[in-house]
């Protein structure tokens, strides 16, 4: 038997809950450290058996009952007192939900897009598409120009 196995069973043997097994007895004859440890544990258990708990004061129950009556006689807390804890819990829940929503929204806005660099040659297909995107509102207003009547005196001769 190894020292670790002996140390695991030592508390039960020292408390008298278990008799000293034969394998443990053989190990203890050859191991002075385990023998000393068992002797110390038996002394500790003997001291614990002699120890008695102190008796509570004879007036303990009387004082406790008086204190309970005093507490019960105090003015009951108003409805605002009872409402405070749930209101604080609801406010905290709302704040956490708002924070989580903002965090989620910021995370969606900060997703890197596959953007093309700003250095694009004018006249290229990519440059034309970017120009169309930037000037979308202007190009949608061209329809309004077609609706205007052309006045003959305003038109210049070519």
Image: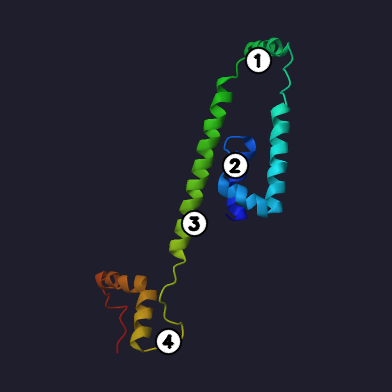
**Residue 20, numbered circle:** 2
Residue for badge 4: 120
Between 137 and 157, which is closer to the camera in this rendering? 137
Q: Element at badge 1?
A: helix
Q: Upstream in the sequence, badge 2 or badge 4?
A: 2
Contact (Cβ within 8 Å) of mark 2 with mark 4? no
Q: Upstream in the sequence, badge 3 or badge 2?
A: 2
Residue 102 placement, left or right of 127: right
Where is the C terminus found, in terms of image quarters? bottom left
Judge the density around disc 1: few (<14), some (14-19), many (≥20) Cα neighbours within 10 Å.
few
Label 3, label 4: how far apart the Cα atoms are: 34 Å
Query: Is residue 83 in view?
Result: yes
Residue at (55, 31) in percent of width and height: 85
Label 3, label 2: how far apart the Cα atoms are: 64 Å
Q: Is residue 145 above or below residue 51?
A: below
Q: Element at badge 2?
A: loop
Judge the density around disc 2: few (<14), some (14-19), many (≥20) Cα neighbours within 10 Å.
some
Label 2, label 1: how far apart the Cα atoms are: 56 Å
Contact (Cβ within 8 Å) of mark 1 with mark 4? no
Between 67 and 139, which is closer to the camera in this rendering? 67
Label 2, label 4: how far apart the Cα atoms are: 90 Å
């Amino acid at each position: 038997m190894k020292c670790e196995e002996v140390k695991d069973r030592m508390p039960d043997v020292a408390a008298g809950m278990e008799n000293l097994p034969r394998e443990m007895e053989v190990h203890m004859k050859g191991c002075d450290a385990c023998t000393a440890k068992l002797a110390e544990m038996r002394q500790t258990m003997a001291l614990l058996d002699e120890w008695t708990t102190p008796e509570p004061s004879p007036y303990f129950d009387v004082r406790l009952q008086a204190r309970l009556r005093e507490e019960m006689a105090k003015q009951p807390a108003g409805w605002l007192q009872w409402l405070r804890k749930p209101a604080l819990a609801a406010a905290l829940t709302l704040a956490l939900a708002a924070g989580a929503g903002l965090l989620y929204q910021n995370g969606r806005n900060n997703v890197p897009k596959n953007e093309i660099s700003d250095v694009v040659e004018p006249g290229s297909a990519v440059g034309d598409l970017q120009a169309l995107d930037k000037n979308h509102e202007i190009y949608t207003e061209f329809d309004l120009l077609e609706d205007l009547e052309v006045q003959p005196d305003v038109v210049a001769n070519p």
